[in-house]
Image (tube, helix red, strand yellow):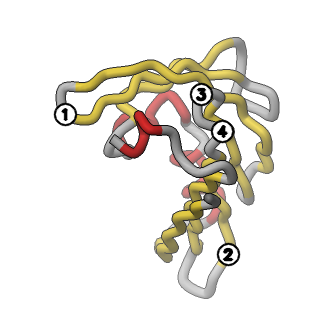
Amino acid sequence: MSKTLEATVEITASPQQVWQVISDLKRMGERSPQCRKMVVLGGPVGAGTKTININRKGLLVWPTTAKVLSFEPGRLLRFRVAENGTVWSFALEPTQIGTRVIQRREAPNGTSKVSQF
């Protein structure tokens, strides 16, 4: 069963300013309720970059890995989590007051039993 979650927010900052925050994967743990840390492997983040992630929910702690699928500065960041196939994306759109951020989690094959737990 396919399951997509999406949230949109408008921020009074330029797409470039918002991009600096969103594309800093090393700080993902500061913004995510589940991913506590992303370790970027290799050099600067771009399409093809891989990460090792430490996740936590309650007492349960587990690692995952991800690969950046799209990296379009000021516009789009997408990455796939290998263990469950989910694709996370952050799309930026300029607005009259700043930037609209659309965050999406796509689970084309549904979520794993561990994720559901």
**Circles 1 and 3 in contact, beta carbons < 8 Å:** no
Callout 1 environment at 10 Å: few (<14), some (14 to 19), or many (20+)? few
User: Whole-Å distance between the Cαs marked 1 and 3?
Assistant: 20 Å
Figure quadrant of the N terminus: bottom right
Q: Which amino acid does label 2 sit on?
A: Pro
Binning the other alpha carbons within 10 Å of mark 4 as few (below 14), some (14 to 19) or many (20 upward) gives some
Residue 35 higher or lower than 89, as above or below: above
Neighbours of disc 2 within 10 Å: few (<14), some (14-19), many (20+): some
Q: Where is residue 102 in the image (x, y as percent from the top left)?
A: 59, 67
Report which residue position mark 3 lands on. 83
Three-letter residue code for mark 1: Gly
Q: Which amino acid does label 4 sit on?
A: Gly
Say which label, 4 or 2, has the lower sequence index.
Answer: 4
Q: Name the residue under label 2.
A: 94
Labels 4 & 2 near each other (Cβ < 8 A): no
Q: What element carries label 4?
A: loop
